[in-house]
Each structure stands twice: as C-alpha cells, then as structure tokens.
Image: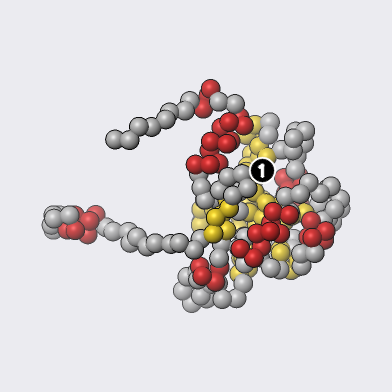
Amino acid sequence: MAASLAFDLSKLEPHERYKLLIGLVVPRPIALVTTVSRGGVVNTAPYSFFNMFSENPALVVIGIDARADGSMKDSARNARETGIFVVNLVDEALAIAMNDCAVDFPPDMSEPGALGLPLAEGVHVPVPHLADAPAALECRKMMMINIGPNRELLIGEVLGVHARSGIVDRATLRIDFDAYKPVGRLAGSLYARQHDRFKLERESFATWTRRNGGDGGE
C-alpha cells in the first residue's frame, strides 16, 4: 500500500483548506452566473463551487464567497433581492470571456456590456443569458444559506434550459460532447478541456458476479 499524507482540517487556516480542497476536487464545472440588479444592471460572474444536486426538483447549488472586505458579491446580492438568476455553462470558446468576467468591475458596470458579450432574452425568468453560451439554466432561487462570514450557498430550481443547436439530441436528450466542448476548473489559473474520455458500463450485481466466476445468485 502506498504511503499517504493525513491532514486535520481543524488545524489548517481557511486559505490552506481552500488550496488543498480545490486542488483535489477536480475538475469542477463552472457556473457563469447572470443576474440583474434592482437598478437593471446585468451582472455576470464565474463560480466553480457549483454542481447540480437533484432532478426532481431540478436543483443547482452555487457557493459564492464574499469580497475581500467581507461585503456580498453582486451575484449573491442580486439573487437574494430578485430571486432569479441564470447559470451559463462554459465551453472552450467562452473560456476567455468567462475569465474576464472575474475582473472586479464596479457594481454599476455590466460585465457583458463592458466585454461586448451579446445577451439573449430570458424565457422562464426575466434575466438574460449569454447568447454565446453552449447552454444556460434559468433558475428561481429556492433558498440562500449563509454558512459562515465569507460564504453563501445559493440553491436554485432550474425552470428552463437553453442549449445551442447540435449539442442535445431532442429525441434522446443525449449530449454530443464533441460539439459541446465543456471546460472544467482545476486550481489557480488551471482549467481542463474534456477531450480525453473513456467509457465504463455500470453493471448489475448479477452481471458482476457472473463476470467474476459466480452464478449471480440464479
């Protein structure tokens, strides 16, 4: 058995826990979140503490950290105040724009406007999504949970999905990953393309037993 390192997270500073965990829990999908302020400013910012957690109801969860001064980020404030948001998913073509959306633009400046990113009108929520995103999830805030001085969990119910033509087979709902080309977050400035894939079929216990020399209980 290979030697291993053991870490007691209670003895690590928060920034050390962060560094360790984001480097190990990879690749993470990226939520490029679009919200609209009460003043009508469209905000777009990326978060990789994100995933889907249920299909009935369809739920996504996003971890949104606070700013360095402890104040709430625009995405969290807008979602809390309006109750709606959109998760734009990120592909290779959108990766640079996604990173640019992480620039600390002032709250009254729209990232899509500053970066020249075209918007498409929402259908299920009055929040636009990025027209160039491979897919976008229109969400209603189900709840927000403050789990500490620097972190909010935004839980949203997905009401509708937009997908670029050619990514989803309408009849089977299967995804063409060669057309999608999703990008995942690693750590620091590192991201991952999803070109190298392999397939594993999930087996029943009976099939597994027969494959390993048993009779599967039959």
Residue at 27% from the left image edge and 57% from the top image edge = 204
Instruction: Give the residue drawn at x 79%, y 56%.
Output: 111
Say left or right for 58 vs 70: left
Left/right placement of residue 39 relative to residue 133 reads right
Residue 90 seen by the camera: yes
* 80 w.r.t. 119: above or below: above
Please indicate whether residue 58 sits to the left or right of residue 3 in the image. Answer: right
Considering depth in this image, is 216 or 166 the residue closer to the camera?
166
Q: Work out whether 63 lies above or below 41.
A: above
Q: Amino acid at mark 1?
A: Ile
Q: Quadrant of the C terminus?
A: bottom left
Residue at image point 68% right, 59% down? 96
Number of residues whose C-alpha sits closer than 10 Å to that of mark 1, classed few (under 14), some (14–19) or many (20 or more): many
SS at mark 1 in the image: strand
Task: Report the side of 66 relative to 17 (left or right).
Answer: right
Give the quadrant of residue 146: top right
Q: Which image quadrant for residue 72?
A: top right
Query: Could you tell me which quadrant the N terminus lies in?
Result: top left
Between 122 and 198, the one nearer to me in the picture: 198
Towards the viewer: 143 or 89: 89
Q: Can you identify the residue that label 1 sits on?
A: 64
The answer to whether any part of residue 123 appears in the image is no
Q: Position of residue 167 (x, y in %)?
A: 55, 72
